[in-house]
Image (tube, rainbow, N blue to C red):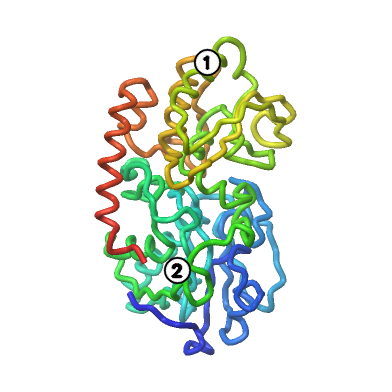
């Protein structure tokens, strides 16, 4: 891997770019427009949600159209699982491939999985033809810092919402995680990084936050997402259809004496890092559209001390014990139907055993602490 200061020395190269609206600010423009001033933009690759994050989760972007010169538009979130991987004939036309897109710090978030699929495709192209585009990552800070949560995803659960061996909250920048993939999986791709200090401040400024997708409206959403994304695998609302997705959550059936008991159990496990505000909310779309939900708003007072994954696992365990209406969803999730969504998201048999009531809270905490320390050591050389 090598660091480069800018792309001006590559003037005239035929480029492909994976990007969306989150790559904004350099010269007060969208970055892909700035690149076009000195590179020939041959192909614009779009991730899930589209170029301007206009599509909701798990909605195909195959019908999206944009007018951007004469460049090709390749949507990498279409109607089938095959659409997630760029075709070899598209990549072999390129001199350079630029990854310029923001991450939120959790392995479920699909943007860096898309980038990994592209990295793997470039690796296969190099093996097949002996030639491949230079892979360039425009790095940016991790919006939730370098803290780690969770355990490595087991290979049996690998999917679009989780690459093997990566924990739930990885603590790396985009360049760090992609370089980890490149070296750990022996992809042998020529990878270059534009340092975050060139186009981006060292830390995110919350007042300048640009939603990378529709349901990550603020930086605070990123702090709860490593745990709260697990709600996607349940019949609890994760707050889609509200103005505070993932921070707001609940269901119509969270009521009665069982709700009172749930409140007691949650209050015993609250810490100074988080405050739960009881509320009612009405989702305008998605789960329980138009129905009053009983639930909570998760207010993170001390982000550095809050362990989102443990909170959500504990919450799901209590709900499953107290409410017979609660269930884990079945059916298609991110193109997969062979495993329930909760298995793909949890990604670990021991965590699934905790949710099933087969592991104590203290044992779960100990297990998480050990695995998190292991990841910090394993990923140390990829922290920039």
Report x, y in % for residue 193: 41, 74
Please identify the residue farthest to the front as the structure is shown: 272
Residue 128 in view in this figure: no
Tag 1 secondary structure: loop
Q: Earlier in the sequence, mark 2 or mark 1?
A: 2
Tell me the crowding category of disc 1: few under 14, some 14 to 19, or many 20 or more residues within 10 angstroms, Cα based: some
Query: Looking at the figure, which quarter contains the N terminus?
Result: bottom left
Residue at image x 39%, y 58%? 172
- Return the residue nearer the eye: 159 or 104: 104
- Return the residue nearer the eye: 110 or 359: 359
Up/down of 366 relative to 335, above or below? above
Residue at image x 35%, y 50%? 166
Question: Which residue position is annotated with label 1?
Answer: 323
Tag 2 secondary structure: helix
Looking at the image, do the residues carrying marks 2 and 1 touch, with CB atoms under 8 Å apart? no
Total numbered labels placed on residues in the image: 2
Q: CA distance from mark 2 to mark 1?
A: 50 Å
Residue 247: which quarter of the image?
top right
Up/down of 186 relative to 277, above or below? below
In the rendered structure, find residue 88 and report the number of the disc placed on it. 2
- Return the residue nearer the eye: 35 or 147: 147
Report x, y in % for residue 6: 48, 83
Name the side, left or right, on which 144 lies relative to 180: right
């Amino acid at each position: 891997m090598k660091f480069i200061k800018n792309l001006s020395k590559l003037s005239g190269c035929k480029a492909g770019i994976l990007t969306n609206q989150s790559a904004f600010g350099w010269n007060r423009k969208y970055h892909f427009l700035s690149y076009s001033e000195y590179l020939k933009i041959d192909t614009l690759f779009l991730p899930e949600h589209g170029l301007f994050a206009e599509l909701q989760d798990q909605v195909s972007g195959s019908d999206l159209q944009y007018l951007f010169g004469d460049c090709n538009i390749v949507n990498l979130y279409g109607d089938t699982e095959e659409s997630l991987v760029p075709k070899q004939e598209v990549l072999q036309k390129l001199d350079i491939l630029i990854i310029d897109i923001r991450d939120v710090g959790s392995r479920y978030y699909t943007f860096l999985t898309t980038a990994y699929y592209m990295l793997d495709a470039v690796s296969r192209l190099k093996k097949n033809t002996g030639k491949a585009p230079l892979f360039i990552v425009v790095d940016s800070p991790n919006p939730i810092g370098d803290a780690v949560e969770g355990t490595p995803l087991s290979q049996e659960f690998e999917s679009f919402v989780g690459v093997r061996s990566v924990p739930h909250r990885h603590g790396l920048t985009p360049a760090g995680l992609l370089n980890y993939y490149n070296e750990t999986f022996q992809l042998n791709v020529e990878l270059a990084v534009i340092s975050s200090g060139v186009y981006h401040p060292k830390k995110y400024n919350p007042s300048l936050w640009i939603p990378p997708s529709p349901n990550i409206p603020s930086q605070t959403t990123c702090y709860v997402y490593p745990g709260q994304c697990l709600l996607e695998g349940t019949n609890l609302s994760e707050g889609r259809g509200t103005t505070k997705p993932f921070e707001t959550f609940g269901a119509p059936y969270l009521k009665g004496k069982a709700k009172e008991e749930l409140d007691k159990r949650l209050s015993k496990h609250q810490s100074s890092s988080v405050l739960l505000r009881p509320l009612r909310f009405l989702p305008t779309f998605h789960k329980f559209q138009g129905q009053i939900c009983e639930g909570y708003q998760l207010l993170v007072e001390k982000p550095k001390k809050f362990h989102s994954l443990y909170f959500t696992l504990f919450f799901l365990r209590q709900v499953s014990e107290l409410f017979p209406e609660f269930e884990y969803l079945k059916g298609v999730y991110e193109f997969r139907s062979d495993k329930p969504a909760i298995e793909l998201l949890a990604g670990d048999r021991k965590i699934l055993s905790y949710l099933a009531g087969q592991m104590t809270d203290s044992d779960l905490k100990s297990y998480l602490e050990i695995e998190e320390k292991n990841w910090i050591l394993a990923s140390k050389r990829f922290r920039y």
